[in-house]
Image (cartoon, helix red, strand yellow):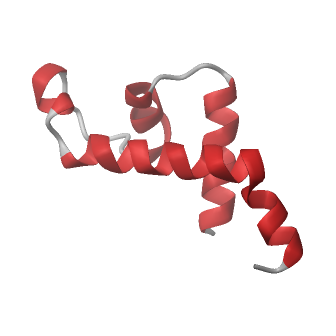
Amino acid sequence: MRLTFLLHLLGLLATGLSTRELADAAVYPELGLHGSDWRAANERRQVQRLRDEALRLSESGYLDLLRGR
C-alpha cells in the first residue's frame, strides 16, 4: 500500500505540484491550513518526508526493491 501511495505521489510530482499542492491533492485534502499555519505545521514536514521518500524511490530505491532488499 505504501509503495502504491509513493508511486502516486511521484506521478503528482511529475506534473510540477508544490509540496503544498501535493498535500491538498493526496496527503491531507481536508486540512485547510494556509500561510504561516501551513509553514509551521507538522503535516508540512510529513509531506516533505513523503516527497523525499518518493523521490529516493525513483532515483535508486526501486533497484533495492528489485534486488529484494
Seen at 52% across and 45% down, the residue is: 52
Near-viewer residue (25 or 41): 41
Residue farthest along the right direction in this orientation: 66
Q: Where is residue 4 in the image (x, y as percent from the top left)?
A: 68, 59
Left or right: 32 in relation to 3: left
Q: Where is residue 33 in the image (x, y as percent from the top left)?
A: 19, 31
Q: Where is residue 3 in the image (x, y as percent from the top left)?
A: 67, 63
The quadrant of the picture occupied by the N terminus is bottom right
Residue farthest along the bottom direction in this orientation: 68
Left or right: 40 in relation to 61: left
Tally of numbered tags:
0
Seen at 79% across and 59% down, the residue is: 62
Q: Position of residue 61 (x, y in %)?
A: 72, 58
Image quadrant where residue 14 sits: top right
Near-viewer residue (64 or 36): 64
Near-viewer residue (59 or 17): 59
Image quadrant where residue 63 sits: bottom right
Seen at 48% across and 50% down, the residue is: 50
The quadrant of the picture occupied by the C terminus is bottom right
Seen at 54% across and 23% down, the residue is: 17
Near-viewer residue (12 or 65): 65
